[in-house]
Amino acid sequence: RVENSAFTPLVADIGDEQLAALYEDMVVVRRIDTEATALQRQGELALWAPLLGQEAAQVGSARALAHDDFAFTSFREHGVAYCRGVEPTAMLQFWRGSTQSGWNPRDHNVTAPAIIVGAQTLHATGYAMGVKLDGADTAVIAYFGDGATSQGDVS
């Protein structure tokens, strides 16, 4: 760890073991991504949107979620799914087209990937409104890329 006067206080509560676990998650999701990209290029997967370069954002935000928080993902958040307990084989089944969903969203509190650009933001908003009306102490997070920001529904 490199000490920095601006950032060190923000991570003072994260110990060496937690840092190592976060790093391990980033390495594992990078490896899953590398293998799945190769499978897609070989025609074994219908589609695979790489997460290359987004590992830290996905792992960090997913690991910050509580167990009952809910994540709504686009087609690139394989790291989020992994951190929420989705087996890599379930992710690959989805992208191979050999299953309808790949996993039950309620089992992991993360949705199957949204293929329609920006659609997950509407789903997350509705779910968050329901959580608020229920009075639950649950966070809801929506993942989307810069392409989704040009969709009217996202605005």
Image (cartoon, rainbow, N blue to C red):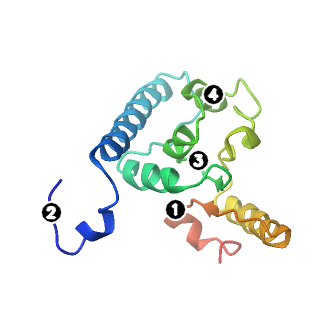
- How far apart marks 2 and 1 lie (CA) works out to 31 Å
Q: Nearer the viewer, mark 4 or mark 2?
A: 2
Q: Is residue 84 above or below residue 120?
A: above
Q: Return the residue at label 4.
A: 90
Q: Amino acid at mark 2?
A: Glu
**Taking 129 as reference, is 45 left or right?**
left
Residue 62 image offset from top left, x and y in percent? 52, 51
Q: Return the residue at label 3.
A: 75
Q: Return the residue at label 1.
A: 145
Query: Of callouts 4 and 3, which one flags the residue occurring earlier in the amino acid sequence?
Result: 3
- How far apart marks 4 and 3 lie (CA) works out to 14 Å
Q: Return the residue at label 2.
A: 3
Mark 4–mark 2 CB contact (< 8 Å): no
Q: Nearer the viewer, mark 2 or mark 1?
A: 2
Q: Nearer the viewer, mark 4 or mark 3?
A: 4
Circle 2 crowding by C-alpha within 10 Å: few under 14, some 14–19, many from 20: few
Circle 4 crowding by C-alpha within 10 Å: few under 14, some 14–19, many from 20: some
Foreground pick, 75 / 57: 57
Residue 74 image offset from top left, x and y in percent? 60, 52
Foreground pick, 38 / 23: 23
Query: Of callouts 2 and 1, which one flags the residue occurring earlier in the amino acid sequence?
Result: 2
SS under mark 1: loop
Mark 4–mark 3 CB contact (< 8 Å): no
